[in-house]
Amino acid sequence: MKDRITELYLIRHGETELNTKGVYYGWTDCELSENGIMQAEDLADILQNVSFDAVISSSLIRAVVTAAVVSGFTPDEVIKDDRLRELNFGDWEGMHHSEVKEKYKEAWEKWGMDWRNAAPPRGESFSEIYSRVKCCIEDILMKHKGERILVVSHQGAMRIIPMVLLGLPEEAYWSFTAEQGRYSQYEIDEKGQCIVKRVNSGR
């Protein structure tokens, strides 16, 4: 009997106005820009012949709208999961890194020296976002075994998901990126072995 393959499509949300400003805005809820909507529409065209059994998104509106546009699901049909949110930057939300370095010099330096465990004031550490994203992906793979799933999230989470799928160490976080307007595709067999099919593909 042939193994049931789980297909996982990963997409980072489309561009927002805050993206263009280069500020930290992890949990700040904001809409897609016009360009972000076009990015999602382009991906919908690219994936028009791919039908998804489930669409799971970060609960933030920029991810939910991207998921709906790309998949053809309504926003109500998209499964929202808080665990797929971006890192919570706490007091640094809405600030450019140059401003953070000036106003929060000590916390900024600590964050750079201990990137796993240090966190922005009233924010979240890498260890915390890693734990919740890992738990979410493991739940998805268990609940949707043998299905084709679209997951829409943010840069931070999109760096973590391949680490979980491929069993890579934490340092691998810095080896991944997720481009807007692109998608990645992974296949996971019943033994949990993962094959990378596409990374940041635009076709």
Image (tube, rainbow, N blue to C red):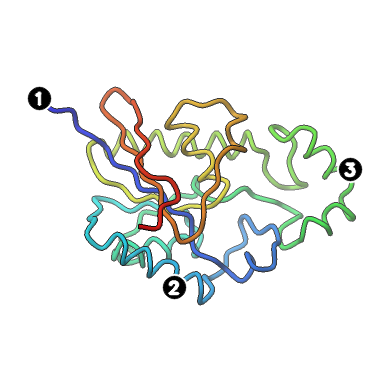
User: Which one is earlier in the sequence, the residue at label 2 or at label 3?
Assistant: 2
User: Which one is earlier in the sequence, the residue at label 1 or at label 2?
Assistant: 1
Residue at 33%, 65% in the rendered image: 44
Residue at 22%, 37% in the rendered image: 146
User: Which one is earlier in the sequence, the residue at label 1 or at label 3?
Assistant: 1
Residue 99 rendering spot, x and y as whole percentages = 84, 59
Residue at 76%, 32% in the rendered image: 114
Left/right placement of residue 101 relative to residue 17 reads right
- Residue 1 badge: 1
Alpha carbon separation for disc pair 1 and 2:
42 Å
Image: 132 above or below 50: above
- Amino acid tagged 1: Met
Residue at 62%, 38% in the rendered image: 174
How many numbered tags mark residues here? 3
Circle 3: element type: helix
Image: 90 above or below 110: below
Alpha carbon separation for disc pair 2 and 3:
40 Å
Badge 3 crowding class, 10 Å Cα cut-off, few under 14, some 14 to 19, many 20 or more, is few
Residue 24 rendering spot, x and y as whole percentages = 69, 57
Alpha carbon separation for disc pair 1 and 3:
59 Å
**Image quarter hosting the N terminus:** top left
Image: 176 above or below 70: above
Callout in the foreground (2, 3): 2
Residue 151 rendering spot, x and y as whole percentages = 39, 50
- Amino acid tagged 3: Glu
